[in-house]
Image (cartoon, grey):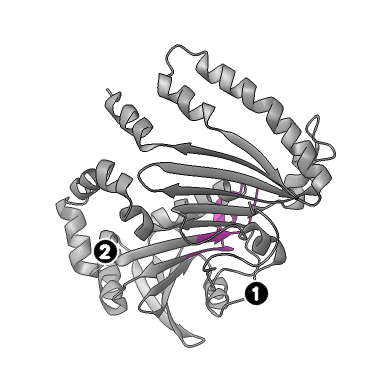
Amino acid sequence: MFSLRNLLALAAALAFGAAASAAGPVGGPLEKMLPADAEAVAVFNVRQVLGSDLYKKHGSDQVKMALSDPNFKKIVDATGLDPLKDIDSIWLASKINLKAATGPDAVPKDALAVVHGNFDPVKIESAAKDFLKQAGGALNSSKEAGLTVHEATTPGQPAVYFTFPDKTTMLAGFDKAYLVKSSKGEKLNDAMVRALAGYGGKESMYFAGVFTKEIKDQIAAQKGFEKIGPNLDAASAAVTVTDGVALTASIHCADAKTADALKLVAALMLPAIKSQVTSNATVPPYVKDILDGVKLTSEKNSVTVSLNVSADIIDKATKDKP
């Protein structure tokens, strides 16, 4: 229950930091239950990662060993939910709040998790009741707009709400009304639609965010970014795992002039970063190979940085581990 809060917060932090290639219709299977006011979205394509050659070669045995823990097996048996078989994808959405909050305000009520897979709602509800009771908490359920919404509470922790619109979808969040409203399938705001335009559905992970006024103002306050900051629109980063790893990070601007200025700044920064990293004697040689493959491109209003980490480089890295 509590890891959900961390994941939602992580999504908000990661998603704004890296976009859409160009404005237009979303290329992939866009989640229909994302909140209309979402400013940061993270997608974890669990099934794609588990099917990749890289996972099978370097991660499968370690994950299976970790999941062989007797306590974990009890949870799988009780819920009927095996994450290696029953989870397909996880979508995390939230508004962006740069101001650190404390107390009740620290709970991200405008955040939501949408999990797709294969669920047994009755079995999960029963298991949740037992686990929460052992922790001194409780599970209460109510009917809301045709949904059975569960409220999970434990002493000293914020309530977590979850529901199953069907046996292949679970929604979870920290505000009941926000969860129910999102379950009805709202129209995403235009900025987030642009931020998700580069999502094609085959990525292992995808992070998208919009540049809010607060973020724009903070960027514009930095020397050299006075004219760039106000004209930033959206950002995204994609990670695709095959036998290697491909990464792209893009920033979409309001106009081509801003994109050109941003590309110039990036073109000046990349060599300096590469020089600083490779001059460190403790940095392995294969890191230089990775940095040599970094590409900076622009198209219309967008600037993109991309790199590929090949299977050979990953093999070298794993062999160099102490």
Which span is picked out in magenta?
92-113
Q: Secondary structure at mark 2?
A: helix
Q: Is residue 261 above or below residue 210?
A: above
Location of the C terminus (image quadrant): top left
The stretch drawn in magenta includes residue 19: no
- Residue 156 visible in the current orientation: no
The residue under the point 80% across, 47% down is 256
Q: Secondary structure at mark 1?
A: loop
Residue 294: give x, y in percent of width and height: 56, 33
- Residue 255 visible in the current orientation: yes
Left or right: residue 274 versus residue 157 is right
Earlier in the chain: of badge 2 and badge 1, it is: 2
Location of the N terminus (image quadrant): bottom left
Is there a contact, CB below 8 Å, between mark 2 and mark 1? no
- Of all residues, the one furthest to the left in this rendering is 70
Q: Nearer the viewer, residue 22 or 213?
A: 22
The residue under the point 26% across, 66% down is 81
Tag 2: amino acid: Lys
Q: Which residue is mark 1?
A: 187
Q: Which residue is mark 2?
A: 85
Left or right: residue 71 versus residue 146 is left
Q: Is residue 35 above or below residue 21?
A: below
Residue 285: give x, y in percent of width and height: 42, 19
Q: CA distance from mark 2 to mark 1?
A: 31 Å
Residue 28: give x, y in percent of width and height: 53, 65
Query: Crowding at label 2, few (<14), some or many (≥20) Cα neighbours within 10 Å?
Result: few
Q: Is residue 140 above or below residue 269?
A: below
Residue 244 falls in which quadrant of the image?
A: top left
Tag 1: amino acid: Lys
